[in-house]
Image: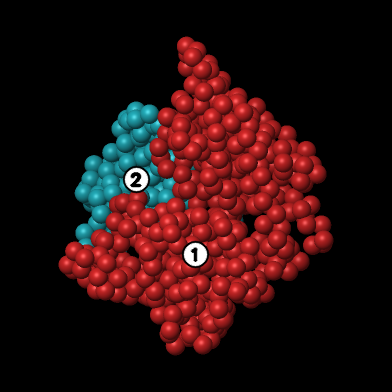
Chain colours: A red, B cyan
Amino acid sequence: MNLDVQSLRTFSRLAHSGAEEAAGSLSTLTGFDARVAVTKVEMATRADVEREFRERDLVSVHIGFSGAIEGHTVLAFDRERAVSLVDALVPGASDDPDSDLATSGLKELGNIMLGGFIDGWADFLGDSIDITTPTYVELDAGRSLQDVIGAEGVPGGAADTDVPDPSGTTIDSDHVLAFRNHLETVDEEAGFYIYMLPTQESVETIVDVAGNAEDAIPVETFTSFSQMISEGAGQASEDLTAMTGIDTNVDVSRLSFVPVEGVPMELTDDARRGVVLEFSGTPSGYIAILFDPESAESVADALMPGMESDPAMRKSALQEIGNIVTSGFLDGWANALETTIEISPPRYVDDIASAIVDPLVTELARTQDYAFLIDSAIATPDETFTCDIYALPDERELRAAFDQLAPEAN
Amino acid sequence: MKVYTTDRSNDRSEPERIKVGVADYAIAHAGSTLVTSGLGSCVGIALADVEAGVAGLAHAMLPSAGAETKREAAEDDVHPDTWKYVDTAVPELVRELTDDGAERSRIEGRIAGGSAMFEFESSAGAVGERNVAAAREALGANGITLIDSDVGGDYGRSLAFDAETGELSIRRAHGETHVI
């Protein structure tokens, strides 16, 4: 399976307008005015997607689709949000959230929202897409996505016979293209998520229609790159542990493709401290290493145990940490890409999280509409601190770097 | 983008707090507050006709759109990138407000943001500053009086814009807030 940036843009646009359709249906049905905050195309492995589902306390409605393209869509919401939705749909039903009345309300909502989401793809492909009847699923920690979709993703609906067992295609694959749309109501942060997991064959179908074959990169390249990012995060985690004496793990390591303006919206308006650096080479770009205020204090303490430190010393301790994490994160890239990546001195920052990333994105926005966003989180098992890493490589240069990862593609 | 003004066919009232994303805008009426967060080099353009009780807030990233975006923005359909650029966002925001009962001569403009948080080696420089200059120019060109501004510096801002009073509250990272 090959992918190109033009196809990714098309995917992103279709997913975004599909999510807007779904948000419109939600408003009509429930009175909740919702809007699409961010649409991301995640180049993930099965494990990545599963982790994302497991980490949240979500209830969800699953619908399979087949026809022009095949795969699964999932409408997921926070448990509390689900209760308020049920109340809006079926007044009184939320008294017993596990009742058939309550879950059937959510299934109907899923049916209409996900149906609206899929319609745009059918229009784009000029072919019909059938959806199966919805399944209500509580995604608790004990169940993997495999259980959920493999066992129940294709319930006995009219399209049942048309849909091949998806566990043999999408979900068993190491490479998954996941479309993740974050919807929010205008006055609350609480989220709805629409995930779409097309089969590899379906991705190819769309690439054939939308893409530029000459520019296409084997999907394995994206996976190799994801792997490189994970290894970089792992190295950064080891270095962080060596410096602070505190055990750390890589919690998140993700590569996604987002409209540039969507990047700051991935962050909140809470205060963050850390460093911003510029890197140059193939690729060049920007990196932000951010800590919440408590984490920043913990890290500075760990670096200067038992010392009376003034704010200037704590600031330089964080700068040093930023340097170490960045080196760990990027050194592996330089090796894998057989290039040199120069890193600028770290600039200390203590500001609104989304405002820290805004100038980095703005620089990229001058030449590109979409960005490859790399986000990783390194955390200590005992919650002493969390370190968030955001890297934004230049899109064209990253594509050149991809060629280095997959020379056989040329 | 959801606009709360055009559809009065239902009884749902406008929410009290309306979020504006990056490269985005919203219109609100007296009783509601428009909010946007994380302005670094981006600029927030807040326009209000207090007498008509209508206000609009845009969050733009870059000073100027390419010719293509401008041409398409001039047609009926609003180009999706209109709100990314100051020079296309301002006239469109003015049009939205006047369509909703605002008098151009009564519209008061306030701008915030456009800081220079980092100096990048690779950068052509000072996007924040250029965003602010573009906002001043676009407001002037559209006959809008600029009442006040809170721009520049090396820090981020989050905004809350009261549609009833036209007051723009600007919050910095550690809670310092001031109103223009």
The residue wearing badge 2 is B35
Above-or-below relation of B107 to A71: above
Q: Quadrant of the C terminus of chain B?
A: top left
Please give the name of the residue rendered at 43% of the width and 85% of the height, measured from the top-left corner.
A157
Relative side of A377 to A213, left or right: left
Asked if the residues shown at circle 2 and circle 1 are in contact, with their CB atoms under 8 angstroms apart, the answer is no
Q: Say which mark, if any, is on residue A271.
A: none
- Mark 2 or mark 1: which is in front? 1
- Residue type at mark 1? Leu
Q: Say which mark, if any, is on residue A145.
A: 1
Above-or-below relation of A79 to B137: below
Q: Chain of mark 1?
A: A
Between A288 and A57, which is closer to the camera in this rendering? A57
Q: Chain of mark 2?
A: B
**Place of residue A100 in the rendered image (x, y in percent of width and height, measured from the top left):** 26, 74
Relative side of B69 to B155, left or right: right
Please give the name of the residue rendered at 34% of the width and 28% of the height, measured from the top-left corner.
B176
- Residue type at mark 2? Val
Q: CA distance from mark 2 to mark 1?
A: 37 Å
**Place of residue B53 in the rendered image (x, y in percent of width and height, measured from the top left):** 23, 50
Relative side of A94 to B46, left or right: left
Dot 2, crowdedness within 10 Å: few (<14), some or many (≥20)?
many
Rendered image quadrant of residue A132: bottom left
Between B88 and A400, which is closer to the camera in this rendering? A400
Please give the name of the residue rendered at 63% of the width and 63% of the height, measured from the top-left corner.
A175
State the SS at label 2.
strand
